[in-house]
Image (tube, rainbow, N blue to C red):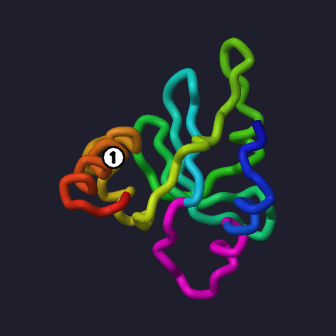
């Protein structure tokens, strides 16, 4: 699977080129289908490789990571890192970061944010 469609790549590059620091909404979620590893991506540098967002490889952490390195990962059985085709959110990265730090993982944060949104009658 191609992790970034041309439209998604353009949106990430636009976020990365923004001159004003913004609390962007994650535009993509990558995950390891065989175990640990989840990334929420908000922007891409002009180099076309450096992504920024929230990474969870055992502990949620804000920072930059390489698209090339993520695409190069080969898992048992020939699996690769995948993009969650059904991921969408209206919440900024700061909300995801706070929830992930509170719960200990992006996956648990996603559950918490969905439950809270349903309870409050608002979209995630």
Looking at the picture, how far across and down is residue 9, in whole percent? Answer: 74, 61
Q: Which residue is mark 1?
A: 109
Residue 103 in the magenta stretch? The answer is: no
Is the N terminus in the top left, top right, bottom left or bottom right quadrant?
Answer: top right
Q: Quarter of the image holding residue 95?
A: bottom left
Residue 32 higher or lower than 17, as above or below: above
Q: Quarter of the image holding residue 105?
A: top left
Residue drawn at the location 42% of the way across and 35% of the way down: 58
**In the depicted view, which residue is nearer to us: 63 or 119?**
119
Residue drawn at the location 63% of the way across and 87% of the way down: 19
Residue drawn at the location 20% of the way across and 60% of the way down: 120
Magenta part of the chain: 12-26
Q: Residue furthest top?
A: 77
Looking at the picture, how far across and down is residue 122, in whole percent? Answer: 29, 63
Q: Quarter of the image holding residue 34?
A: top right
Predominant secondary structure in magenta? loop
**In the depicted view, which residue is nearer to us: 95 or 66?**
95
Residue drawn at the location 69% of the way across and 78% of the way down: 17
Looking at the picture, how far across and down is residue 57, in whole percent? Answer: 49, 37
Residue 110 higher or lower than 94, as above or below: above
Q: Residues within 10 Å of mark 1 (few under 14, many from 20)?
A: many
**In the depicted view, which residue is nearer to us: 25 or 20?**
25
Q: Is residue 32 left or right of residue 68?
A: left
Q: Is residue 51 left or right of residue 60?
A: right
Is the C terminus in the top left, top right, bottom left or bottom right quadrant?
Answer: bottom left
């Amino acid at each position: 699977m191609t992790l970034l469609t041309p439209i998604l790549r353009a949106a990430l590059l636009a976020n990365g080129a923004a001159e004003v620091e913004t609390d962007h909404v994650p535009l993509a979620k990558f995950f390891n289908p065989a175990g640990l590893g989840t990334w929420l991506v908000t922007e891409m540098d002009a180099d076309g490789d450096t992504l920024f967002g929230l990474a969870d490889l055992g502990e949620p952490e804000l920072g930059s990571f390489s698209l090339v390195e993520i695409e190069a990962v080969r898992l048992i059985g020939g699996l690769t890192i995948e993009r969650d085709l059904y991921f969408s959110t209206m919440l900024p990265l700061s909300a995801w970061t706070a929830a992930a730090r509170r719960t200990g993982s992006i996956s648990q944060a996603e559950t918490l944010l969905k439950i809270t949104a349903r309870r409050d009658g608002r979209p995630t």
